[in-house]
Amino acid sequence: MSRLELSDLQKTFGDQRAVRDFTLTVEDGELVSFLGPSGCGKTTTLRMTAGFETPDSGSIVVDGSDVTDMPPNRRGMGMVFQGYALFPNMTAAENVEFGLAVRKRPTAERRTRVSELLELFGLAHVAGSYPHQLSGGQQQRVALARALAVQPGVLLLDEPLSAVDAKVREELRTEIRRMQVQLRITTILVTHDQSEALSISDRVVVMNRGAIEEVGTPAQIYAEPRSAFTAGFIGAMNEIPVRVVSGTHGQIERRGQRVTAPGAEGLPEGELAVLLVRPESLEPLQATSEVLNGDLTLRGRVEVQTFLGATTRLLLREQPAGPDDRYALPSSRRLAVDVASASAGQWPAGSELSVRIPVGSSRVIADRSAAPAAPAGLAPSIESVSRSSARG
Amino acid sequence: MSGGSMTGEATEETLPAIVAGAHAERLVRRRTRRRTRTPAWAAVVLGAAAVYFLVPLYATAVFGFSTGKAFTLQPLFAGLADDGFHSSLLLSLGYAIVTTCLALVVVAPTAYLVELRFPGLRSTIEFVSILPFVIPPIILTVGLSTVYGIRSPVNLISSEWAPVLLVGGYFVLTLPFAFRAIDNALRAVDVRMLSEAAASLGASPVHTFLRVIVPSISLGLVSAALLAFTTAMGEFTIAALLGYPTFPVYLLNVNAYLPREGEALVLVSFFITWAGVLALAAVARRAPGTQIVRGGPM
């Protein structure tokens, strides 16, 4: 239970700036996730916090005391590694006991604490097993128990679930959150898995190219992303080109349809902007000639249907108006529309479909071309579509 | 076994994965075939090697355990009863043990630090460690006796510190084996991650090395100890030139005037070494957690 302040951290490896201008305060008992693609600087920031990397400048303060130059073994932080990092020569119980033994705690206290933790993580029956005799999930539980045994002020989790299979991952992340809330332990979770970050964090820090892209609660990050990068990285997001008609009134226009949309206020008039809208917000229209008040429509041909369980994703290709169509969807992208699987049969591949774009659940951002492209596989691209269909 | 599981997984994967899986399976099959059918040339090589190693042993035994006409253990008993045998064996054992300890104490922490903190120094350390292969022991000894000889300002050779030269020489000769064995073991475990995990739990670097790293590389340490010990036990050139009556030097002398006794003792030393090797290997096999060091997921 500690308050962690990271101020203006900078780190360069060779000529590559790994982390820049990183400032963040993690409140007592808060779980903050660092989310971003590989190479975005999230792990480097975590390692600087742990003391395994030294920042070029900036400071790391825990409960008011500066630990920037303190060796890792004196920082009192617990860490869980992606590859478990269990000591191969020690049993599960000995691994959990290690930190207590280092601190020279009395034997009776050590035994009690170890058996409590093993019990808590459902590991009592494997206390005497060596790491190579345990499953991935069990090994990661031992690693968690080991990190918590020393009652660290701050718990650092470096992609702790990426090496375990999907079912165990879900179980473990719930367990981590339960434990973290119960012990009110200040925690940083590094992950590239957006569902992991959104499901268990109090706040999410989205990182890109070494810097913080944005910080917010999972709901804010998901519903109101402030950048195209966040929008593309968190869940699937459609990016629809529009033109700003009036920055003063927040009015945009697309193919003759003029609406007022959130986020358009203050954008330069006459310039192109991007309307961001989630696939689940789009609604198929029954009648193509339906007149809408205040919302946009888009018409296209269904190219692929991807079954996702409760919903089915339709990928729509809009016919471009010409070679210089400035409203054309980004090349290789299609409009993703999520519909209930039960009704998906109405729109087989090849059929025409009009969708309503409710501007109330969308957001306009500027300068699409300057924003980095969303990582492959997250935004609906034609490549990911062909991969999905090959799998089916 | 692995071929079967690979096929099972591939059916749920994408098309490229299926293709890759099938390719991998073919490779596995091809390898398995190679493994099960021993080619004729391998048997020939194995047979030739066996002849090369066993014939001299057999000849030594025939010569050492006979009067020239009949089998007898008399040369063996005579050899074992000789005072020189006991003193030289003890001398060699003593120096070999000191050399082995020195090799472990110096090489293990060095290799650990190179792996963890100074990866840039690896090529330099590797080069230094193989120098004994390039510089023959005789050159080493001449160098040692010049630098630390009677005319040198650091005259060790006629002082009570003279054994340091012998152990130092032995130590240099053991470097290639000790470094290689320990370095391989360190590279088989994730030294960096284990060290960081120990540090995050509050362990000092020394505590981490002794309690986490050393037990994790025990097999490598045992191999290094074995190689260092046998190298030191069998070393002749440095001991002979520096004037130490070690066991190999004694064996050569005995051979000169009592050849049958000498050969009988050569066999004894051969079996002592083998017993030592097997005993250490047995200890290593029982060390906990060594499976991790021995076999990865492949």
Image (tube, coloured by chain):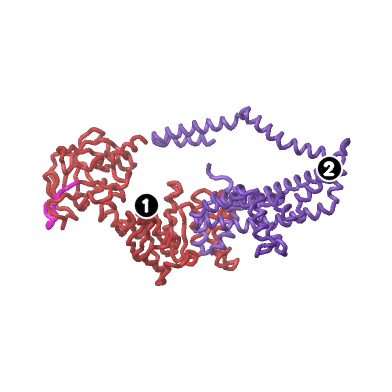
Q: Is residue A202 visible?
A: yes
Chain identifier matching the purple colour in the rendered picture: B
- Labels in figure, total: 2
User: Does residue A194 sit above or below B34 in this rendering?
Assistant: below
Q: Position of residue B138 (x, y in %)?
A: 67, 50
Chain identifier matching the red colour in the rendered picture: A
User: Does residue A90 sit above or below B255 in this rendering?
Assistant: below
Q: Quadrant of residue A40?
A: bottom left
**In the image, is residue A246 part of the stretch drawn in magenta?**
yes
Specify the amino acid type for callout 2.
Answer: Arg
Q: Residue furthest top?
A: B40
- Check the residue under mark 1 and report the chain it is in: A
**Rendered image: mark on residue A240:** none
Q: Which residue is mark 2?
A: B260
Pair 2/1: label in front: 2
Mark 2 surroundings: few (<14), some (14-19) or many (≥20) residues within 10 A: many
Span of residues in magenta: A241-252
